[in-house]
Image (cartoon, rainbow, N blue to C red):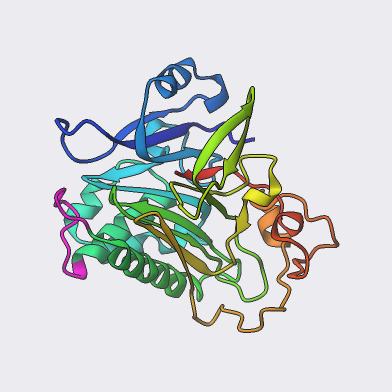
Amino acid sequence: MNGDGFGVGYYSLDPELEDGPCVFRAITPAWNNMNLERLAEKTKSNLVFAHVRASTYGVLSETNCHPFTYHSLMFMHNGGISGFDKIKRKLVAHMKDEYFIFLQGSTDSECCFALFLDTLDKMGFNPADESTNFGHDVLREALLQTIEYIKNWTKDITSEPSLLNFAVTDGHSVVVSRYITSKTEEAASLHFSSGSSFVEYEPGQYRMERLDRGQNVIMVASEPLTFERGDWIAVPTNSILSIKNQTVLLHPIKDEYYQEDPLYSRSSNFAESKGLMGSVPLADTVDVEIPPLEREGRSRPLTVS
């Protein structure tokens, strides 16, 4: 159960409002917050981030709830940095003052976002420029470099893997990673679904409709949000997903933890022990011959739509 607060961020359709996302965060469980229900009933947006928190680092406070924002950018994390307390000093010392000052909470996730902002800056892009459409290529490269920094800083500190499922958007493009610093373990689960419309076919029951080849609706989540198993595709471990102009792109992250063999079976034990995979029906490994939603379990929701 993820009852340590929640957050929702979205980009308004009102052209008179300033650029940048609107964010509502609270420390109450999402299922027990009437304000969330009231706001959801009256809110429309083309791009929404939502996150429910199960804390690993940091106290229970609104400043520690995702999504985190910086001008036009929005960021979420599902997972955790192994040995974060041992690399935190190095991580914050690496970044410029403005991104260190930006930190308000005490989580590894917010530090990851600040590191991402610093990386984007050092690539020659100003994260504070709300008029900039960074594009999925730039966001993807900055996220890959962020992962590279964390990977290099932690590998000599601890043998326990880090789970780095990140989601970032500038309001136009979305980039999401599914990554673990291990060659033998599965990352925290991640799925996506796309179609022409997302409809309520019975009270409280939804499914993705595909009336044509268009992808008018794209959803990314740490677990499938419907019981229609055929609607969802599992994102491979150590991959990065990009969304731009209603198109989904998948790229492998080819580093020392990448598995070239498509038939290699990773273990789900570590992700399960962190509550980020759920049960795996067959033994304790992932078998690529089994349909993705049968071999991978359920984890906390990390949603992009």
- Spot the residue most to the front: 212
Q: Which residue is drawn at 16% across and 55% down?
A: 132
Nearer to us in this view, 239 or 25: 239
Find residue 169 and report its horizontal and vertical position in percent. 33, 51
Q: Nearer the viewer, residue 15 or 60?
A: 15
Up the image or down, 199 lies above or below 169; here it is above
**Residue at x 85%, y 60% (from the top left corner):** 282
Q: Range of the magenta residues?
A: 122-133
> What quarter of the picture does the C terminus occupy?
top left
Decide whether residue 129 is among the magenta residues: yes
In the rendered view of the protein, which quadrant contains the N terminus? top right
Q: Which residue, as the protein is rendered here, is positioned at the far right? A: 283
Residue 238 among magenta residues? no
Count of numbered circles in the view: 0
Q: Is residue 187 above or below residue 201?
A: below
Q: Which residue is drawn at 65% across and 65% down?
A: 186
Residue 24 is left or right of residue 262, and the answer is: left
Q: Where is residue 114 in the image (x, y as percent from the top left)?
A: 30, 55
> Would you identify the image quadrant in which residue 62 lies?
top left
In the image shown, does 92 or 22 lie closer to the viewer? 22
Q: Position of residue 260 (x, y in %)?
A: 61, 84
Magenta region, main secondary structure: loop
Q: Where residue 198 sits: x, y (%)? A: 53, 38
Q: Is residue 263 left or right of residue 16?
A: right
Based on the displayed image, in which of its 4 quarters is residue 148 positioned? bottom left
Dividing the picture into quadrants, the one containing residue 267 is: bottom right
